[in-house]
């Protein structure tokens, strides 16, 4: 049966962090998380408090028992701050935004080209009349 440390490792992978990055982010000593995993040890309550303070979107019930979802539900707390998202999710969002911007620019460019072409044709017709 998976222990709290196993679920924590799962969350670290989900967040796109290395164990070292995670340890530093919660103020734990270098190698803390991997040492706990290797020894199948329990995580201290002070460390859990630091984890929840640093990663408020993490569902405490899931972390401790494995029940429910890894992240808090929309009703509990949304991750509204882009900077709180895991780095890999930030990059994924940035790529989607860049793609959408490029698509819109292409549509606008085609529309502008069409308008300019129509204007040139109108001016040429007027010149022929004169």
Image (cartoon, rainbow, N blue to C red):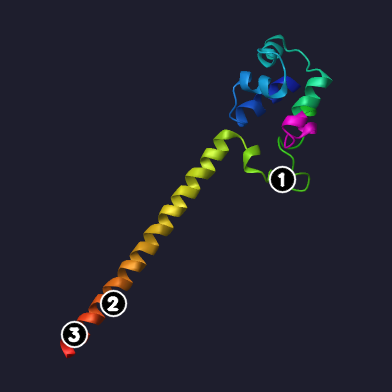
How far across and down, in percent of the image, does residue 100 sit? 46, 53
Give the quarter of the image for residue 67. Answer: top right
Screen quadrant of the N terminus: top right
How far across and down, in percent of the image, does residue 78 sit? 72, 45
Frontmost residue, 102 versus 66: 102
Image position of 48 (left or right of 20): right
SS at badge 3: helix
Dot 3 or dot 1: first in sequence order is: 1
Question: How many numbered badges does the structure rendering display?
Answer: 3
Q: Is residue 55 magenta?
A: yes
Q: Examine the rendered structure and indicate whether residue 77 appears above or below residue 45.
A: below
Q: Is residue 20 magenta?
A: no
Give the quarter of the image for residue 129. Answer: bottom left
According to the image, label 3 marks what residue? 127
According to the image, label 2 marks what residue? 119
Q: Which residues are magenta?
A: 52-62
SS at badge 1: loop
Residue at horizontal 22 percent and vertical 86 percent from the top:
126
State yes or no: discs 3 and 1 in contact (Cβ < 8 Å). Answer: no
Viewer can see residue 106: yes
Give the quarter of the image for residue 6. Answer: top right
Residue at horizontal 74 percent and vertical 40 percent from the top:
72
Disc nearest the viewer among 3 and 2: 3
Q: CA distance from mark 1 to mark 2?
A: 50 Å
According to the image, label 1 marks what residue? 78
How far across and down, in percent of the image, does residue 60 sit? 79, 32
Q: CA distance from mark 3 to mark 2?
A: 12 Å
How far across and down, in percent of the image, does residue 116 sit? 30, 71
Screen quadrant of the C terminus: bottom left
């Amino acid at each position: 049966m998976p222990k709290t440390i196993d679920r924590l490792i799962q969350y670290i992978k989900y967040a796109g962090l290395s164990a070292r990055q995670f340890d530093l982010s919660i103020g734990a000593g270098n190698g803390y998380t991997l040492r706990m995993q290797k020894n199948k040890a329990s995580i201290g309550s002070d460390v859990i408090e630091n984890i929840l303070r640093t990663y408020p979107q993490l569902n405490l019930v899931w972390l401790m028992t494995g029940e429910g979802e890894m992240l808090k539900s929309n009703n509990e707390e949304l991750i509204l701050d882009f900077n709180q998202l895991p780095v890999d999710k930030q990059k994924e969002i940035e790529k989607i935004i860049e793609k959408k911007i490029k698509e819109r620019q292409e549509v606008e460019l085609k529309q502008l080209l069409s308008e300019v072409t129509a204007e040139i044709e109108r001016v040429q017709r007027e010149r022929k009349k004169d």
